[in-house]
Every structure is written in structure tokens, then in C-alpha cells.
Image (tube, rainbow, N blue to C red):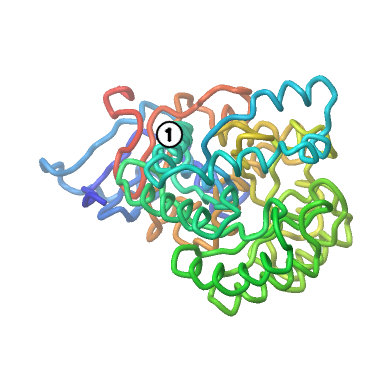
Amino acid sequence: MSKAPTLIVRNIGSLVTCDPRHGEEPGVIHDAVLIARGGLLTYAGRADGASFPPLTADVVDIDAGGAAVIPGFVDAHSHIAWVGQRGDEYAERAAGATYEELARRGGGIRSTVRSTAAASEEELCDAISGHARRMQEHGTTTVEVKSGYGLEHDAEMRQLDAAIAVGHQPDLPDIVTTYLALHAAPDGDREEFLDDVCTRGVRDAASRATFCDVFCEEGAYTVDECRRVLTAALKAGMAPKIHAEQLTHSGGARLAAVLHAVSADHLERADDNDLRALAAAGVTGVILPGAALVLGGPPPPGGRLLAAGATVAVATDSNPGTCYTESMPLMVSLAVATAGLTPAQALVAATAGGAAALRLHDRGVLRAGLRCDAAILDSSDWIDVAYHLGANPVATVIRAGLLVAGSEEGLQ
């Protein structure tokens, strides 16, 4: 990464910190300024309390022109390591076919596995880079990227290697890698596949991925199979995540609570006892309103998770089958429209909540000492992130103190 210069963002109409220290969500400070050095914030507050550095040649001085500034989005659940397309399935579902019917015919995840497993690392890098760049243009500064479309061992490792390579590019979002060990059901002997995942799979993935994820679902993998793999992953040094209660009430949320997983994701069919168990175990609930909308199932339990006392994250679930989008602002809008969150709660869930779902304590909030990851909006009102449905409200993106999307000229 290039060395970040000293950065000043002045004339901020509303600085949305998502910091609970600043009172009611989302922690707004008016007439504000941001100052950063070396990629870290040194000041985030009212302009009349700032100590400005000298305006030397190496200082980047941005006039926000009264616009609102929010933390960079932290997208804590994505499947952008894929090639191929499934637009035909989208049309079939619109005509009445169910996700389960398509999967039984070799579609769904299996379709993407066939095309992705055959791809080279270079092809995967190109695909991931394209998705990540569009995510960044919509204000995302950190994105989790899962494997899971390789199935076969070497193909899974290629997906992780490609995601890591893209994450090293200085002009793209930070990437956090997750080994989605159990996704589509295997072609061959199931026990042999599980044995291989629990030995060679977690061993080789541990040097490439922070987390291990499983799809706990009828037609995919059982609670016992998921427990087996996640126990092996924990021993190898990866923290657990679980796709839970998306299509059926599978027991995945309770497993996440027992294992003190980092997150349980989807949760559309979780009951209130499940959600209370997640809260008690400190498991972040990641809601994916785009996928829930496309599949036509129950709404995500955003408000119910908060009522249970859990931390909530909002993410894209960006994937080729059930949520082909790179827009976190759209997910914030859908979280308000369908998941029982207020605009302030949804914005916090898409920033600080996403950071919690990835165990990242240095971002998601605009506070001195944390990373300078921020988005300058094209509006003076932060609520337009949720209110302006389907729009891209982001004018300029700053990642670790560097301008990575938009331009300071566009702010004048």
C-alpha cells in the first residue's frame, strides 16, 4: 500500500461517526472535520476544536462542501470469487421455479462451481477485482470474500489465493478471506469429502483464511457435519462462521451459539430463542436483505436481533445466484424497508456491525486512533444512503487515508 499522506477533510456538514460515544445513533457531529496521518485518524470532531497541521505540499486538503461523511462500509458477507453467470436461473425463478428445484437439476451453487472450479487464478483475480471495484465505488472499504465455488481442494485454494492477491492491490478495498468449506454437496463419497476437508482442507486454508464457514441447510450439510468441520477449523486456527436458518430451520444458529462463532448469517427462519442464544454467546447476526428479497422468503430478523440484544451487521451476500449486487447503500435501504431497522440502525449495522462480524476493531467507526476509512456523500444529509433507493450516494471514497474512488476536484 502507498504511504498515506496527511489528510484533512474540512467543511463537513454532518460527520456520521457510528460511534456510541457521540450519543444517539448514528453519532452525528455537525460542522466537522477529519484529520488523518499515516492512514489513521488523529481527529474526528467539530471544526472549532481541531488543531490543523500546516498546509505543506504533502498534505491532501479536501473541502467537503457541506456534504455528509460516513464510515466506509464493511461488507461482512460476499461470494465474489466466481466466474460464469446464472441469469437464466433468475428468469426461471421469476417464472415459478424454486431454488431447491433448480439445485436438484444441477443448477444453483453447482452451476457456479462448474465454471469457477475450471477458472485459473488470473481469471479469478480479474473477476474479484471487478466486483471489488464496483463495491468500492459504492463506499465499501472492506469486504469479506469467501471461497466455496471450487468444491475440489485445489480449486478452493485458488479462490482464496486470488482473493488475497486482489486484497494486496492498493486501489481496491481491504479483503478478509473466508474458507467456505461446506457449500455445495460433493459429487463423490460424502465421508471421504468431509475427511479431506477436516484434514487437508483446513490445514491448507488456515494459512490463507481468517474464518471457516459452512452452509448448514437441508440439502446441503447437517448440524453434525458442520460441527465436525468447524471443530477441525478451530484447531487449525480459523474462527467459525455459519450460514444458518436461511431456507429451513436447520439448527445452525444454535450451533453458532454453542461454538461461539463470530457470526451467524441469513437467519430468516431463526426463532426468537435462536436469536437470544446468539446474543448470549456474543455472536453477530449478519442479515442479507437482498438475498431474502430475491428468494421471496421471510424478511431478515434485523429488528428481532436487536430486541434480543445481539449485534447486527448488514451485508450484500454478493453472489451470482440470489443477490447479484455490489451496493451496500441498497442493502441499507432494504434493511430499513424489510428487516425492521431504522435508517440509523441500518447504517451502523453496515459499518460498525460489519466490522464486528469480521472481528475488526480498527474500523467501522470514525474516531481518533482508528483507520481513516470514509465515504464523502454527494448529499448533505446522511439519511439519503437509505432514503434514495437504488442510488449511489457516494462521491469520494477514502481507504486508510488514501483517495481510492472519486476525486477531491469533484467536491469543490
Quadrant in the rendering for residue 407: top left
Q: Position of residue 366 (x, y in %)?
A: 45, 50
Nearest the eye: 161 or 187: 187
Q: Position of residue 150 (x, y in %)?
A: 56, 50
User: Mark 1 = which residue?
Assistant: 130
Residue closest to the far bottom: 235
Nearest the eye: 10 or 111: 111
Quadrant in the rendering for residue 316: top right
Horizontal relation, residue 96 to residue 132: left or right: right
Quadrant in the rendering for residue 113: top right
Q: Position of residue 136 (x, y in %)?
A: 43, 37
| Residue occupying the point 52% across, 36% down | 83
Residue closest to the far left: 57
- Residue 145 vertical position relative to residue 98 in the rendered view, above or below: below
User: Which quarter shows the C terminus?
Assistant: top left
Nearest the eye: 108 or 136: 108
Residue type, label 1 = Gly
